[in-house]
Image (cartoon, rainbow, N blue to C red):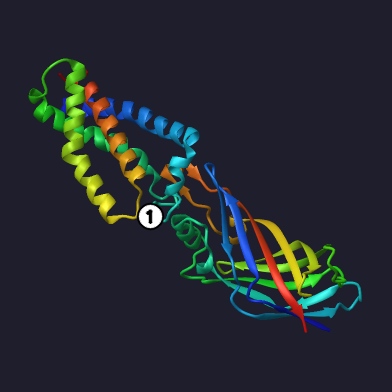
């Protein structure tokens, strides 16, 4: 349990920096991709900002548990294990959620694709961290 | 005493910006007819106005359905469906000619139940059909009306506090 929490915390810190840093750069250099977020579908009064920024840790702890439970199934080099882990998570968890989100919410294909790729990148990075510190 | 009848094809726009884009939301046609009355003030220099225009917040069109809904939410459209501009005064009685004249005046603007008084710079002229075109614009802030400009994605997308409200009243003298 301690190992899961520690690896989750380390991955959370790394994902926090990369995810929100990447998002900040994305907003700055590709502003047109983010115009669609000016919509009441997305929280606008800032009362959930803490939850928004906690996401990196929520996903890291969840993935840390998942890795610890199923890591024996991911074989090969560190890079291959991280990539496969990210892909497995994306196919099992992300793809169905993105599918139902797009089918039921007034959001664009670009938005859903960007969320999928964002989640895939997060899971691959987390997988690489787990493969390194909790092989 | 004079009376100006505000025609239904008068319009109003709200222009603002975020850190990623600019937006322009318009009410392209007022859709109703109202009257503004002009009287000389007691000191004989200025003009006292009485009359207002009442605009439906759900008539705003930001040319993007999400942004339109966001503006209506920010202006608290469900609780305050109307935006009011009450005309109070002009610095002088304008002589209406085809050549635009600059005049100033005072208005009360009520948004989301909060009323604030502003000075406005007008441009007034006569149009081809002998009607009166009154253009007015004013910079104001969401915060003037206790409104919070929206932020998105944990504050990474921020709407700026300042807005420009511009109206184009097409009127006739009666």
Q: Seen from this angle, which residue lies furthest right? A: B44
Measured as percent of width and height from the top left, residue A15 is found at: 32, 29
**Chain label for disc 1:** A
Rendered-image quadrant of the C terminus of chain A: top left
Pick the front one: A22 or A66: A22
Q: Seen from this angle, which residue lies furthest left? A: A72
Res A31 visible: yes
Pick the front one: B123 or B158: B123
Res B156 visible: no
Measured as percent of width and height from the top left, residue A115 is found at: 31, 40
Q: Seen from this angle, which residue lies furthest top? A: A77
Left or right for B146, reference A1: right
Picture quadrant where residue A23 is located: top left
At x 47%, y 41%, the residue is A32
Label 1: which residue?
A41
Measured as percent of width and height from the top left, residue A116 is found at: 28, 38
Left or right for B50, reference B40: left
At x 45%, y 60%, the residue is B69
| Element marked by disc 1 | loop
Above-or-below relation of B64 to A50: below
Measured as percent of width and height from the top left, residue B6 is found at: 69, 77
Picture quadrant where residue A4 is located: top left
Left or right for A7, reference B3: left
At x 42%, y 56%, the residue is A40
Circle 1 Cα neighbour tier, 10 Å, few/some/many (<14 / 14–19 / ≥20)? some
Left or right for B26, reference B133: left
Q: How many marks?
A: 1
Rendered-image quadrant of the N terminus of chain A: top left
């Amino acid at each position: 349990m301690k190992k899961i929490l520690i690896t989750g915390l380390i991955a959370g810190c790394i994902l926090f920096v990369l995810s929100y840093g990447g998002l900040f750069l994305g907003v700055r250099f590709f502003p047109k991709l983010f115009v669609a977020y000016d919509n009441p579908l997305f929280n606008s009064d800032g009362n959930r900002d803490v939850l928004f920024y906690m996401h990196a840790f929520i996903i890291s702890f969840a993935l840390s548990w998942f890795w610890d439970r199923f890591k024996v199934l991911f074989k090969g080099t560190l890079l291959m294990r991280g990539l496969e882990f990210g892909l497995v998570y994306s196919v099992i968890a992300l793809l169905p959620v993105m599918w139902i989100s797009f089918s039921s919410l007034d959001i664009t294909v670009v938005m859903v694709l960007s969320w999928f790729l964002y989640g895939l990148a997060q899971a691959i990075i987390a997988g690489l961290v787990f493969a390194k510190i909790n092989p | 005493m004079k009376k100006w009848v505000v025609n239904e094809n008068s319009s109003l726009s709200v222009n603002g910006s975020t850190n990623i884009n600019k937006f322009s939301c318009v009410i392209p046609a007022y859709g109703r007819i109202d009257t503004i009355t002009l009287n000389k003030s007691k000191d004989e220099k200025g003009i006292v106005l009485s009359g207002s225009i009442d605009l439906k917040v759900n008539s705003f069109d930001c040319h993007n359905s999400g942004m339109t809904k966001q503006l209506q939410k920010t202006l608290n459209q469900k609780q305050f469906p109307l935006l009011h501009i009450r005309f109070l005064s002009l610095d002088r009685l304008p002589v209406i000619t085809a050549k635009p004249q600059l005049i100033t005046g005072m208005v009360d603007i009520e948004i989301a139940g909060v009323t604030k008084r502003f000075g406005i710079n007008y441009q007034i002229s006569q149009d081809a059909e002998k009607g009166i075109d009154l253009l007015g614009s004013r910079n104001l802030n969401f915060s003037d009306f206790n409104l919070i400009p929206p932020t998105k994605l944990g504050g990474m997308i921020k709407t700026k506090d300042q807005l420009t409200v511009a109206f184009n009243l097409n009127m006739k003298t009666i």
